[in-house]
Image (tube, rainbow, N blue to C red):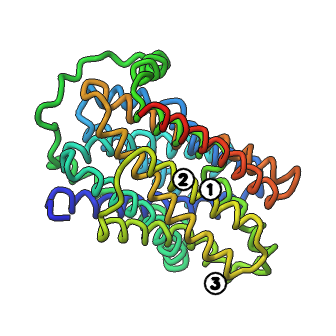
């Protein structure tokens, strides 16, 4: 936070992330009221994460050739188009299923145009020495947006109604879009960015390029298996967990379950920044992921509300810790000439694979119950994590 450019980026990032969550709160509520469609709700999840799976590496490759600031601005522009589109359709009462699906896809594409270039921009703003701190702070900013967004979205709906409220939400994206015209970019000593963007072929080429690099492969594998097996799918099942814990009504107790995970992550950012003694290594990242997995495994098995809150809080703490450490290791070790592609591959694994956690936890929950599905997914993930740890240890 000593860096003035980073402080500006941090504030703009919090506002944009808050706006992202405000849009979710308002649009999901109106769409549910109008269509009452579980299928559309499922499409909302897929449209949010599939663009990361399909396009993260391509966007990273584009960021190797084009100024990342301009790509992020394109993402902010799409966010504004999505929020304004919702507002116009709400005001005119012309929202249909196809138009809702189109806006959900636009929102998902905006996200993938934002995340990978933003991580590259962090490297340009603060450099390698302060990169671990910047990654942790931005992750904390993301969870701050998750915490504040629902409250702001609910307040805007009450004050202005969903139609005008979601149009007002477009203003929260403007600080990021405008600041990027003056943001610093271009790390000193970086290799020329000349490789062509070749779509799906880039994914195969990038996997081959990092194949012999232990840190890059282990951290990308860590991001992929944690997202595929569990991800954040348990958040969508929270109403069911709340009901089983005796707090199924939409009151403060239910809201605390939703907020506990994000609150733990925010605390992790503060603690790790102030303590600064946790060594950034692949082994440490995997151990933190194991602790996250154990927290969720325990949460799936408890029936005491206060204990469930504490375990979700712990899960949020460890999730931010291992994710930011893995991302830092990838950025620091990625070859300069393909840094965008390598970071994009990491995001494809860590964010894109979340689309499939709805199968392991969600569909599994419909078959055997949400407690068993989350518990079994966490147990299988735990076994994978031990294998990844052994692989890292054997290649020292």
Mark 3 against mark 2, which lies toward the viewer? 2
Residue shown at 74%/55% (left/top)? Answer: 374
Q: Position of residue 347 (x, y in %)?
A: 46, 39
318 or 187, which is in the foreground?
A: 318
* Other-residue count near label 1 (Cα within 10 Å), few / some / many at <14 / 14–19 / ≥20: many
Residue beneath disc 3? 252
Q: Residue furthest right?
A: 367
Q: Which residue is the site of mark 1?
A: 293
Q: Nearer the viewer, mark 1 or mark 3?
A: 1
| Secondary structure found at label 2 | helix
At 57% from the left and 73% from the top, the residue drawn is 260
Name the residue: 51% across, 48% down. 286
Crowding at mark 3 (Cα within 10 Å: few <14, some 14-19, many 20+)? few
Q: Residues within 10 Å of mark 2 (few under 14, many from 20)?
A: many
Marks 1 and 2, how far apart in space?
A: 6 Å
Return the x and y of residue 216 as percentages of the image width and height: 41, 33
Rendering quarter of residue 234: bottom right
Query: Looking at the image, is 86 positioned above or below residue 121?
Result: below
Which is nearer the N-term, disc 3 or disc 2?
Answer: 3
Q: Which mark is residue 289?
A: 2
Q: Specify which label sits upstream in the sequence, 1 or 3.
A: 3
As drawn, the label of residue 22 is: none
Cα–Cα span, label 1 and label 3: 26 Å
Q: Are marks 1 and 2 in contact (CB under 8 Å)?
A: yes
């Amino acid at each position: 936070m000593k860096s003035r450019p980073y402080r500006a980026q941090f504030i703009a990032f919090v506002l944009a992330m808050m706006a992202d969550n405000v849009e979710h709160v308002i649009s999901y509520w109106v769409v549910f009221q109008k269509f009452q469609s579980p299928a559309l709700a499922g499409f909302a999840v897929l449209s949010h994460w599939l663009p990361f799976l399909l396009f993260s590496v391509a966007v990273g490759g584009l960021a190797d050739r084009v100024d990342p600031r301009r790509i992020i601005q394109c993402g902010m522009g799409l966010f504004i188009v999505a929020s304004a589109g919702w507002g116009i359709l709400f005001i005119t009462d012309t929202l249909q299923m196809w138009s809702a699906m189109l806006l959900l896809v636009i929102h998902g594409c905006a996200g993938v145009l934002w995340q990978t270039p933003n991580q590259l921009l962090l490297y340009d703003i603060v450099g390698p020495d302060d990169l671990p701190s910047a990654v942790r702070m931005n992750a904390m900013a993301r969870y701050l947006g998750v915490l504040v967004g629902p409250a702001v979205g609910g307040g805007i709906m009450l004050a202005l109604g969903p139609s005008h409220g979601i149009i007002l939400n477009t203003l929260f994206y403007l600080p990021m879009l405008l600041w990027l015209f003056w943001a610093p970019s271009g790390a000193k000593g970086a290799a020329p960015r000349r490789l062509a963007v070749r779509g799906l072929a880039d994914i195969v080429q990038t996997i081959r390029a990092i194949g012999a690099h232990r840190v890059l492969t282990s951290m990308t594998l860590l991001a992929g298996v944690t997202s595929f097996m569990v991800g954040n799918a348990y958040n969508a099942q929270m109403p069911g967990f709340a009901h089983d814990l005796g707090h199924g009504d939409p009151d403060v107790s239910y809201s605390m379950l939703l907020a506990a995970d994000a609150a733990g992550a925010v605390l992790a950012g503060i603690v790790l920044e102030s303590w600064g003694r946790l060594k950034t290594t692949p082994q440490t990242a995997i151990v933190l992921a194991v602790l996250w997995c154990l927290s969720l495994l325990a949460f799936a098995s408890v029936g005491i509300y206060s204990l469930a809150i504490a375990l979700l809080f712990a899960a949020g703490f460890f999730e931010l810790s291992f994710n930011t450490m893995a991302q830092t290791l990838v950025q620091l070790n990625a070859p300069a000439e393909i840094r965008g592609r390598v970071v994009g591959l990491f995001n494809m694994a860590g964010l894109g694979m979340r689309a499939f956690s709805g199968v392991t936890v969600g569909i599994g929950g419909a078959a055997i119950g949400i407690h068993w599905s989350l518990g079994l997914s966490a147990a299988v993930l735990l076994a994978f994590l031990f294998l990844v740890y052994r692989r890292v240890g054997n290649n020292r």
